[in-house]
Image (cartoon, rainbow, N blue to C red):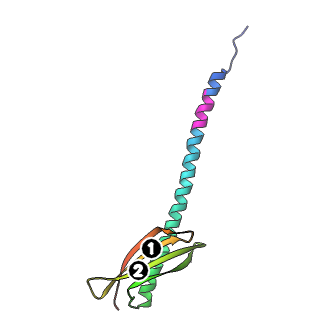
């Protein structure tokens, strides 16, 4: 009688365990990459909103008054909540402007913060 050819049950089970561990690691990596991509996309759009708010101050050529203001902007089919704080500086012809951007769904978590200085025209 010729010896049987093929794998034993133990060899098949070990191969399946190795395959399961490898697939689990690949799925976890793909999931983390998807989440990181979404976070980076949100931070990118938040940076555009903040930059636009600063550019609006420069284009208007108005001397910004000190204090806080806030509002909503649309960018990338999403609503963004912005908060702007204008402070004085030791230099009387400059104002410090801080713009914080949050998503509409989580206004308490700042995704992006931009600090700029606006000069008197």
Sequence-wise first label, 2 or 1: 2
The residue shown at (46%, 80%) is 53
Q: Could you say which is closer to the camera, residue 33 or residue 81? A: 81
Crowd tier of the residue under label 1, counting other residues whose Cα lies within 10 Å: few below 14, some 14–19, many 20 or above:
many
Residue pictured at 30% horizontal, 88% vertical: 93
- Residue 43 location (% of width, % of height): 49, 66
Percent position (x, y) of residue 85? 40, 80
Q: Which residue is mark 2?
A: 85
Residues at circles 2 and 1 in contact by the CB criterion of under 8 Å: yes
Q: Is residue 111 above or below residue 4?
A: below
Read off the magenta span.
14-21
Say the numbered circle drawn on residue 58: none
Asked which secondary structure carries label 2, the reply is strand
Residue 73 is a magenta residue: no
Task: Answer with left or right where residue 32 lies relative to residue 100.
Answer: right
How far apart are the alpha carbons under marks 2 and 1?
Answer: 9 Å
Viewport quadrant of the N terminus: top right
Residue 22 horizontal/vertical position (percent): 57, 38
Residue at x 56% of width, y 71% of height: 104
Residue 75 lies, with reference to residue 14, above or below; the image says below
Q: How many marks?
A: 2
Farthest right residue? Answer: 1
Characterize the local packing of mark 2: few (<14), some (14-19) or many (20 or more) Cα atoms within 10 angstroms: some
Q: Residue at x 26, y 83 (%)?
A: 90
Residue 20 magenta: yes
Q: Nearer the viewer, residue 28 or 69?
A: 69
Q: Which mark is residue 100?
A: 1
Residue 13 located left or right of residue 103: right
Expressed as whole percent of the image width and height from the top left, the position of residue 81 reads 52, 75
Q: Residue furthest left?
A: 90
């Amino acid at each position: 009688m010729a010896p049987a050819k093929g794998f034993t049950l133990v060899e098949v089970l070990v191969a399946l365990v190795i395959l399961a561990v490898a697939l689990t690691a690949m799925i976890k990596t793909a999931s983390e990459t998807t989440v990181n991509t979404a976070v980076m996309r949100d931070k990118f759009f938040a940076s555009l909103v903040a930059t636009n708010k600063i550019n609006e101050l420069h284009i208007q050529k108005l001397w910004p008054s000190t204090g806080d203001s806030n509002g909503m902007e649309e960018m990338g089919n999403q609503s963004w909540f912005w908060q702007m704080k204008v402070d004085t500086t030791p230099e009387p012809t400059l104002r410090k402007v801080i713009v914080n951007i949050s998503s509409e769904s989580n206004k308490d978590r700042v995704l992006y913060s931009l600090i700029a200085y606006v000069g008197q025209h």
